[in-house]
Image (spheres, grey):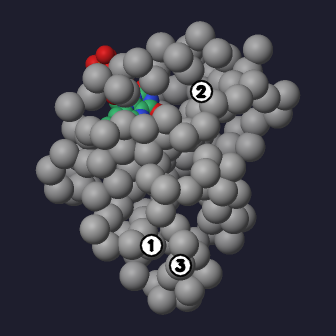
Amino acid sequence: MQVRLLYVSRAVGPQTTTVTGSILETARQHNQSNGITGVLCQGQGLFLQVLEGERSPVNRLYARILADPRHQDVELLHFEEISQRRFGNWSMAHVDLSSTDPMIQLQHPEFDPYSATGALMLAQLDDLLASGQPIRTPLA
Ligand SMILES: Cc1cc2nc3c(=O)[nH]c(=O)nc-3n(C[C@H](O)[C@H](O)[C@H](O)COP(=O)(O)O)c2cc1C
């Protein structure tokens, strides 16, 4: 049985390329060997991540991620059983939310993961990956 999980969190400390690079490297290695796919959005002090895969590995990974000191305020936005993956092409895709592209801001002025429904966030992520462009979060 496959599931999809979506959460948001706040970074502890600056989101440098070294921190992100190290998370992504671990993620890509571990996820590939555990059949997990998804997307990690990062920037503006936030992480927004989708994990997809068999229920047990996804739960085990989420428990590890919850305990990771590199972020806090981890909030579960969405959890569902799925028959098909949406992000099956990536062991962990990466979207940079810190882009300052004004077009993206205009397209997604309402982007605010802590207030939005999980369904809306997933729709915006679909949109993002389809357009191949990053979106910007409101400044804290
Ligand atoms: C925002 C964020 C996203 C992460 N995503 C993943 C991931 O998709 N896969 C993964 O294996 N580790 C991910 N990690 C790292 C895990 O929290 C953990 O450090 C890693 O799995 C190694 O765990 P271990 O030290 O218990 O072996 C993420 C960490 C953070 C802060």
For the residue marked with disc 2, what is the amino acid? Ile
Are discs 1 and 3 less than 8 Å apart at CB? Answer: no
Q: Position of residue 31 (x, y in %)?
A: 52, 26
| Furthest-left residue in this view | 13
Q: Position of residue 123 (x, y in %)?
A: 70, 57
- Residue 51 to residue 113: above or below: above
Q: Residue at x 68, y 49 (%)?
A: 119
For the residue marked with disc 3, what is the amino acid? Pro
Q: Secondary structure at mark 2?
A: loop
Q: Position of residue 30 (x, y in %)?
A: 46, 23
Could one spot residue 37 in this view of the protein?
Answer: no
Disc 2 target residue:
36
Q: Secondary structure at mark 3?
A: loop
Q: Nearer the viewer, mark 2 or mark 1?
A: 1
Q: Is residue 21 left or right of residue 59?
A: left
Disc 3 target residue:
109
Q: For the N terminus, give its image quadrant.
A: top right
Task: Classify mark 3: residues with Cα within 10 Å, few (<14), some (14-19) or many (20+).
Answer: few
Q: Residue at x 28, y 68 (%)?
A: 140
The one of 30 and 3 positioned closer to us in this rendering: 3
Disc 1 target residue:
136
Distance in Å between CA atoms under marks 2 and 1: 26 Å
